[in-house]
Amino acid sequence: MEVVLNRRRLSIGPMELQIAYKVWLGSDKDKEDARHLYRLFGEHLSREELIRALRALKVPLESASEVLGWP
């Protein structure tokens, strides 16, 4: 994914992976960041890709559900 910042292009990893990584880190701040990113980008995310990233990091889906507010 490319982001334009101050007229410069910056490449970042997939947002699904960024969120999964924050959940994996597990500190209160990281969980808060994951929740914020999920709410901010939620409609543009692939839930399947997010689940794939969580599984790759061996994050229990129940833990991710609590952090991200999934039903």
Image: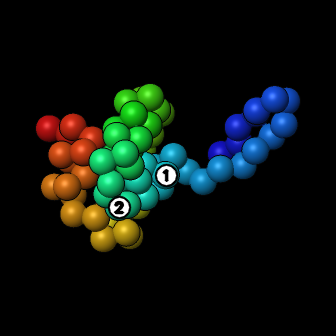
Q: Is residue 71 above or below residue 7?
A: below
Count of numbered circles in the view? 2
Q: Residue at x 18, y 46 (%)?
A: 66
In-image side of 22 versus 62 (left or right): right
Report the amino acid beneath label 2: Trp
Is any atom of residue 51 visible in this view?
no
**Callout 1: SS:** helix
32 left or right of 15?
left
Amino acid on which the number 1 mark rests in the picture? Gln
Which of the image's four quarters has the C terminus?
top left
Q: Outermost residue toward the right?
A: 7
Crowding at label 1, few (<14), some or many (≥20) Cα neighbours within 10 Å?
some
Q: Which residue is mark 2?
A: 24
Image spot of residue 60 (x, y percent): 21, 63
Question: Is residue 18 toward the left or the right of residue 60 in the image?
Answer: right
Is 45 situated left or right of 32 in this image?
right
Q: Which residue is drawn at the image coordinates 28% and 64% (left, top)? A: 59
Residue 55: quadrant of the picture: bottom left
Q: Secondary structure at mark 2?
A: helix
Kindly identify the residue that appears in the image at 20 percent across and 47 percent down. Answer: 65
Q: Is residue 40 above or below residue 47?
A: above
- Whichever of callouts 2 and 1 sits on the residue coming sooner in the sequence is 1
Image coordinates of residue 17 in percent, x first then y, are 47, 55
Q: How is the image coloured?
A: rainbow
Please determine whether, in this image, residue 65 is positioned above or below residue 40.
below
Q: Which residue is mark 1?
A: 18
